[in-house]
């Protein structure tokens, strides 16, 4: 009788489309070719409905997991089998749990006394064949819905981890691995890094320290009195102005002329200035109404020419540049050439402090000071430009500032040194180092043991060691 199987735990496989359902048999209707499960689980997840009904044509496989009724199969502990039995065509028309018509395909009939528990249905599964039973069910609290609802007694048997692990002979497996590796002359993949060949490393083991890192890779014959370090910990010593001057003269002899160094300094300084102005957050095509304004204060010397070069590159990047350079009867050739290029970039040049912006600008670039001529600070134009910069309330970037012996007339927030840093005063702010393109052999020519500290950058920050 079909009623003998009520309450039994079964597993119904409806194919790849509908999946696998498990639950207790609540009804078996041979006339309508349906079977209903209460408290169902779908692919291991509890269903939101209390009961589902299946048509025989959609069942590919039915397994009896546990017999809970008073049937004879239960008392004898025998396994069960699912067979298919044909049904007359007159059985079409009876609705399932959801009210939809049920197909007249063969209905699985439960029989007792067989050792097999598998069958296959020949028909194709349909998505709409799973019928949700209508009708109320007892409401359960969230804890029961989450942690179980009476089905847990079928899972009382714990997995025997120790017994299962005992089936694995680890020593024998490792012995076979060692034998195969010795035959292929390969390194052991589970050995230490020193025992493995480079091809055996994982992707995150490819960068290995072959020897201890030397953080002091730059040594100078004449230290400047101050030591800095990079973000990665490399020590960068400062140099005296005399040694720095010898370094630039050696660069001149090797073809790195002043024009080349001016261009390199202008590019690196302008790149740093663009970053200080906001970078991609400020300089975008959608923000043309807020173009930054930069005031470049220059004197009649090489440092002033470096500032003009920086201003030209900033103007090429759509920055409003106001260049201050007093009128002189005679100017350096480098300044004349840089001024000619600057005028073609669209920047504005003024010779009087009165023509500088009255409102605060976004950035002031200070190139007023000279390493060799400290008497320029007594000139009226110098004092007026320094006072304007200190009163403008804009942050100041100094390019190639003088050594510690000279006080900073304009207090800077950042200072950019070239090649190797000088020993700067406290008013120089945060120190940055710029790569002006000097190769290693030029440093060696003046007695400096040098390895580049820049890595992938051309401007790097320096910290007090």
Image (spheres, rainbow, N blue to C red):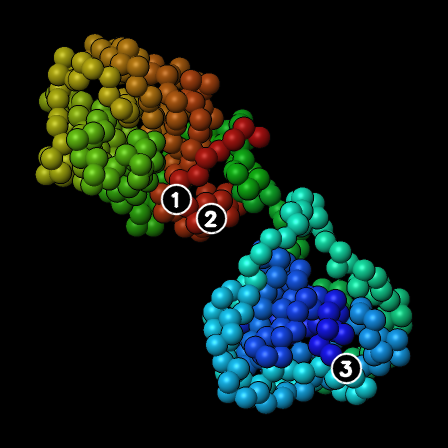
Q: Can residue 156 be spotted in the picture?
A: yes
Q: Which residue is mark 1?
A: 458
The picture places residue 145, in percent across and down from the top left corner, at: 67, 50
Query: Which mark is on residue 80?
Result: 3
Could you tell me which secondary element the residue under label 3 belongs to? Answer: strand
Mark with earlier residue (3, 1): 3
Q: Quadrant of the N terminus?
A: bottom right
**Is 220 left or right of 386, judged from the image as shown?**
right
Q: Residue at x 28, y 25 (%)?
A: 363
Q: Quadrant of residue 385?
A: top left
Could you tell me which secondary element the residue under label 1 belongs to? Answer: loop
**Is 237 left or right of 269, judged from the image as shown?**
right
Q: Residue at x 55, y 66 (%)?
A: 97
Q: Nearer the viewer, mark 2 or mark 3?
A: 3
Q: Quadrant of residue 120?
A: bottom right
Instruction: Reply above or below: 317 against 167.
Output: above
**Pointer 2: residues within 10 angstroms few (<14), some, or many (20+)?**
few
Q: Residue at x 27, y 14 (%)?
A: 392
Q: Nearer the viewer, residue 17 or 106?
A: 106
Q: Nearer the viewer, residue 293 or 431?
A: 293
Could you tell me which secondary element the residue under label 2 belongs to? Answer: loop
**Is 369 left or right of 128, judged from the image as shown?**
left
């Amino acid at each position: 009788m079909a009623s003998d199987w009520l309450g039994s735990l079964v597993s119904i496989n409806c194919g790849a489309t509908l999946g696998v359902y498990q639950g207790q048999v609540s009804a078996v209707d041979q006339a309508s070719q349906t079977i209903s499960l209460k408290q169902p689980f779908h692919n291991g997840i509890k269903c939101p409905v209390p009961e589902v009904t299946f048509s025989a044509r959609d069942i590919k496989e039915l397994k009896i997991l546990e017999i809970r009724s008073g049937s004879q199969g239960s008392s004898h502990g025998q396994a069960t089998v699912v067979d298919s039995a044909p049904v007359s065509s007159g059985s079409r028309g009876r609705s399932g749990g959801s009210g939809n018509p049920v197909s007249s395909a063969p209905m699985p009939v439960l029989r007792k006394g067989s050792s097999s528990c598998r069958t296959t249905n020949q028909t194709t599964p349909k998505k709409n064949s799973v019928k949700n039973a209508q009708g109320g069910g007892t409401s359960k609290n969230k804890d029961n819905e989450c942690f179980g609802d009476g089905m847990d007694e079928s899972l009382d048997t714990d997995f025997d981890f120790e017994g299962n692990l005992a089936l694995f002979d680890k020593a024998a497996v490792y012995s076979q691995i060692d034998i195969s590796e010795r035959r292929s002359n390969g390194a052991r993949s589970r050995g230490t890094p020193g025992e493995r060949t480079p091809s055996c490393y994982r992707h995150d083991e490819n960068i290995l320290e072959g020897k201890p890192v030397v953080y002091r890779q730059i040594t100078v014959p004449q230290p400047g009195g101050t030591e800095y370090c990079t973000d990665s910990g490399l020590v960068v010593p400062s140099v005296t102005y005399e040694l720095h001057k010898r370094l630039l003269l050696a660069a001149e002899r090797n073809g790195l002329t002043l024009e080349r160094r001016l261009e390199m300094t202008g590019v690196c300084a302008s790149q740093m200035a663009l970053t200080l102005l906001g970078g991609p957050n400020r300089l975008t095509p959608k923000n043309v109404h807020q173009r930054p304004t930069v005031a470049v204060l220059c004197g009649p010397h090489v440092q002033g020419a470096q500032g003009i070069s920086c201003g030209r590159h900033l103007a090429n990047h759509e920055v409003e540049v106001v260049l201050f350079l007093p009128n002189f009867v005679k100017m350096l050739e480098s300044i004349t050439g840089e001024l000619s290029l600057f005028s073609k970039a669209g920047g504005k040049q003024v010779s009087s402090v009165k023509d500088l912006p009255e409102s605060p600008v976004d950035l002031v670039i200070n190139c007023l000071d000279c390493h060799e001529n400290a008497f320029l600070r007594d000139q009226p134009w110098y004092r007026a430009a320094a006072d304007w910069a200190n009163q403008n309330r804009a942050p100041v970037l100094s390019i190639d500032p003088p050594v510690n012996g000279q006080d900073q007339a304009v207090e800077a927030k950042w200072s950019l040194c070239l090649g190797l840093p000088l020993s700067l005063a406290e008013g120089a702010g945060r120190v940055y180092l710029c790569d002006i393109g000097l190769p290693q052999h030029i440093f060696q020519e003046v007695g400096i043991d040098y390895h580049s500290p820049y890595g992938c950058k051309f401007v790097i920050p320096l910290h007090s060691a």
